[in-house]
Image (cartoon, rainbow, N blue to C red):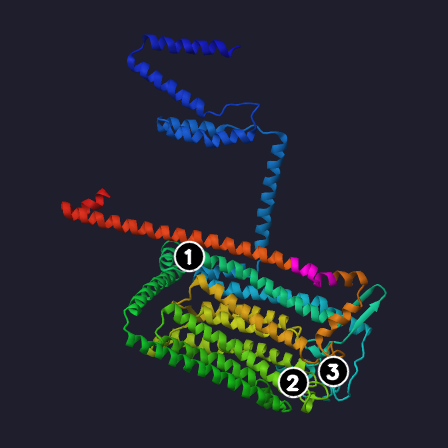
Amino acid sequence: MAVEPQRQASIGEYDGTEGYGHPGDQQSLRSRWASSRVSDENHHQFSRSSTPTDDDEEVDSGGPRDLRSSPLPIALKRAVRQVQQMQVPVVSRKESWKRKKVKSLRILRDNTREVLCFFILWRKSLQKIGGNFGGGVQSFFIFLRFLVLLNFVSFLLIAGFVFIPSVVFRSVGTGLVNSTGPAECMDYNPNSQGLVLFYNYILDLLSGTGFLEYTYMFYGYYNNTVVEDGNFSYNIPLAYLLTAVFYFAFCFICITARLGTAARVAVAKGGHTVGNYSMIVFTGWDYGCLGDRATKLKQKNIHYQLQVDLEEESLKKRAATLTLVQKVILYSLRVLLFFLALGLIIAAFYGIFIATNFSQERTDQDGILGLIFEYLPSIVITAGNFVVPLLCEQIALVERYTPSTTVIVALIRAVFLRLVSLAVLLYTLWRQITCEGDTNSGDCNLCQYNYKVYPCWETRVGQEMYKLTLFDFLINIALLVLVEIPRRMVVDNWSSKLAQWLGRQEFVVSANVLGLVYGQTVAWTGALFCPLLPFINTIKFVILFYIKKVTLFYNCRPALKTFRSTTSTFFFLVVLLFGWGMAMAAMVYSVAAIHPSRGCGPFRFLPSMWMIVPNSFDNLAEITQTFLFFIGSQAFSIPLFVLFCVMLCYFVALSSVYGKSVALLRAQLKLASRDKQFLVKQIEVLSQQLQIPKHAAAAQD
């Protein structure tokens, strides 16, 4: 009731002012009354019947829009907006509890992420690399960290299901299944060497023979142990095979997930010239660069990317104007150089084939010469992977492709050489193990494999992969100590023209990543025959990270001519997936087709490694067998196949729609750019017709 007299007094005061005031005062009162109406409309009224959500929607939708469109002074609008911001919405106790809960969970999530950031492997090192050399070089070290984690988790899988149970059950000495067969096939005793000299232990450590051959490092030391104790049973051969299968499946899932992320980025950024130019100009700068050196390097990198785009466009225009005779000459040159590069690659394969045969024929040699014979295939493979790609790069330059195509062609040839060289090594070993594929003739007739040369052929294959891994690691250390550090010292301390021309070594991301892919493919290929090879590969990649870091900061300079970041990650993961596929094919063939060694390993009593699966299936409970039979039957597989087909069609249609939308947006961008060009031309024409100076026309624009 006390508010009513004050309101009447205020009304009377306004009335008196309106009656005795001047016309200007009346106009001001009208504007005040209008402004008060606008403020009342914009002012959020309190209503107990309205819910907080409705009130919030009214404020967000109606208030600011009316205030913006109302003819009020800016100071008055600012005052009204401050009043709106001061209002506290009335919420219920339940809604307040929900908001506090969501806020607490958000704070907990942020704090958890901050804590987990401290446990990220090489976090500060990667930030330092990205800040000094940009995201392109940083991507190599991120890829290396991915392989380290992949190998470490794979080692934990193998250790938990194969290595530790084998150690425990061997110490207990229970459940050993005796193998049967000819006595000649079971003659395998690598420990019968007697007294050896100390330096022979070093040679054995480098070659995987001697004392290291009959350890948990290789396949031959694992027993065919089946432990059954009441309700507990553990089958070492079955665990050995299934762990290898799950190891490959786990690696495939990790690569596919990472490949999907890279594919989405590559598709989003596109490959058109206009899109590349826009991405470089507007989003090409790396704000993680710190210091003048990194900034200038990034500027040169962007300059090179723009230069590549312009050069590609000029080459396309020049190719369109070639005559028929010039095209015939150009394509003839490319075909000739293609066969030249193919001849170099085939020569490298033949050298690997000869070196492997020569090495396997002289396995009985002792001392340093025997170690050289043991490492001869690894030496030839490494030399071929170093020399042939350099020659292929020079050949690609002569073929006169566009710059990006030149890089891609050189990389494809290098990838083909690295992966197929490993395949040639495996093929040579297969020919000798299976007597050139005919297991019923010659030395293979008795045991279904060449037992005289390879009494435990799985261990021999594991030793070859072990030597390739170790030799690749030693080569990286030797390059750092004997090549990169002396080259940097010569360039920094010698001011001759030769030293300045030589310069510091460039850190080429593509070549380094291909080296990682090759090393990982070797680890996958030998994991079945050398179960601890993933652990060795983990240690190798960890040390390699610090070697490459020292090389990057002290010995090398980043390469100005880089591979496109939009396609490099996707391309390298595809190459890694091809390496996984080759290793998977080798494992499947070894498991299904080649007879296991009768004198060693967990499958010595079976005609093939895969036979452990049906034999173990017969020992399962009847309910489990029925369930597994149902999973493998048509009643389950056909509906599952139909469901996958429907999902595949849905995702294909969805990607088609998204592709059409992206194409439509690109067409609209092109039309908009053409419209702007047309308008600029029209302005120039009108200015010429009206004789308007250019600076005046620009001022009018």
Dot 3: element: loop
Q: Which residues are magenta?
A: 629-639
Kind of residue at disc 3: Arg
In the picture, measured across the screen, residue 85 lies left or right of residue 15, that is right
Kind of residue at disc 1: Asp
Q: Nearer the viewer, mark 3 or mark 2?
A: 2
Q: Residues within 10 Å of mark 3 (few under 14, many from 20)?
A: many
Chain-order first, disc 3 or disc 2: 2
- The residue lying at 43 percent from left, 80 percent from top is 341
Residue that label 3 marks = 598
Residue that label 2 marks = 434
In the picture, measured across the screen, residue 487 lies left or right of residue 674, that is right
Q: Position of residue 19 (x, y in %)?
A: 34, 8
- The residue lying at 58 percent from left, 70 percent from top is 580
Q: Main secondary structure of the magenta part?
A: helix
In the picture, measured across the screen, residue 528 lies left or right of residue 486, that is right
Chain-order first, disc 3 or disc 1: 1
Q: Quadrant of residue 49?
A: top right
Chain-order first, disc 1 or disc 2: 1
Q: CA distance from mark 3 to mark 2?
A: 14 Å
Q: Residues within 10 Å of mark 2 (few under 14, many from 20)?
A: many
Residue that label 1 marks = 286
Q: Residues within 10 Å of mark 1 (few under 14, many from 20)?
A: some
Count of residue discs = 3
In the picture, measured across the screen, residue 474 lies left or right of residue 611, that is left
Q: Position of residue 346 (x, y in %)?
A: 48, 83
Quadrant for the C terminus in the image:
top left
Kind of residue at disc 2: Thr
Residue 630 among magenta residues: yes
The answer to whether one can see residue 523 in this image is no
Dot 1: element: loop
Residue 204 among magenta residues: no
